[in-house]
Image (cartoon, rainbow, N blue to C red):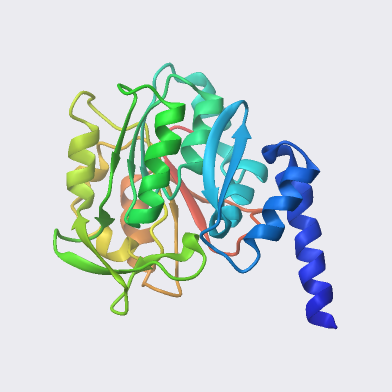
Amino acid sequence: MANIYNQGKNFFCNLVWLSPLMGGILPTAKYLIKARGKPMKLGHGFYNEIAFKFRNCDTTAIKEVIVDEEYKFLDEFLKNYDEPNIVDVGAHIGTFSLWVYHRNPRARILMVEANPASYEILLHNSGKTFSKEQHQVLNRAAWKNNDTLNFSTSGDSMGNKVSTNGDTLIDGMTFSEIVDIATQNNSCIDLIKIDIEGAEEAFFETDTSTLEKIKRLVIELHPKYCETSGIIKKLESRYKHVRNISGRIDAKPVLYCTDDY
């Protein structure tokens, strides 16, 4: 009985917040019923009149980034820059880029996503949002080298990660390589956002000179999967301000690193 009650409660909660994005209660209810037990079931939504695709396993990301606006602390920065140069490592299906575009449609963004299925949806969503000149999408895994890695695509798509038990092979890409690509036509990166499910320790095996090219850095840490103290120490040695963002629904810490606030 408790299980049935929880299923009904979850259905109603999802119906409430997802309906404005899917065009009303009826189409949303139809989707949720058809998607029950089917994590890969495709859905279609609109965010500020921009169409995007998602899977049932992506709904947590949509709620956190688009509905709950967990990156709202970046509002002032995004609205005050003319053409910010942004990098999104662990871009998933593009919820962060959709949110960024609504704040600043002139933003330029490089997106890196490891999961091939998420990457395909990211390609579609970013192509519907940004002009060809504004964005670039790479299907690579953030890592300490270019080795071919085992990558797990099971469970909630936001938890996909590099794992010895992974079911998919994907090539790694280093922090320095990503920064070099993003700064080909710019002297620096205005903002890099990193959410790579425990690979951050390996990803940050880089020298401080690479971090010097980045004005602002946002990173979600995953203490369950890697040692984070060394990462924090490296960021504190580079940036004047390393702030732990409070008030988030998700318990995992997010750090916002800058020199200018």
Q: Position of residue 236 (x, y in %)?
A: 37, 52
In front of the other: 204 or 9: 9
Which residue is more in the foreground, 105 or 118?
A: 118
* Residue depicted at 32% across the width and 74% down the height: 166
In the picture, measured across the screen, residue 222 lies left or right of residue 207, that is right
Mark count: 0
Question: In the drawing, does residue 214 fall left or right of residue 76?
Answer: left
Residue furthest to the left in view is 146
Q: Quadrant of residue 69?
A: top right
The reply to whether residue 109 is in sight is yes
Residue at 79% in and 49% down: 16
Q: Which image quadrant for residue 145?
A: bottom left
On the image, the x and y values in percent for residue 217 come to 39, 43
Residue 3: give x, y in percent of width and height: 78, 80
Q: Is residue 123 left or right of residue 144?
A: right
Residue 192: in sight, yes or no? no
Quadrant where the N terminus is found in the figure: bottom right
User: Which quadrant would residue 133 be assigned to in this image?
Assistant: top left
Q: Residue at x 73, y 55 (%)?
A: 14
Find residue 2 and report its horizontal and vertical position in percent.
Answer: 83, 81
Residue 104 position (above or below residue 261): above
Give the residue at the far top of this rendering: 82
Residue extending farthest bottom: 1
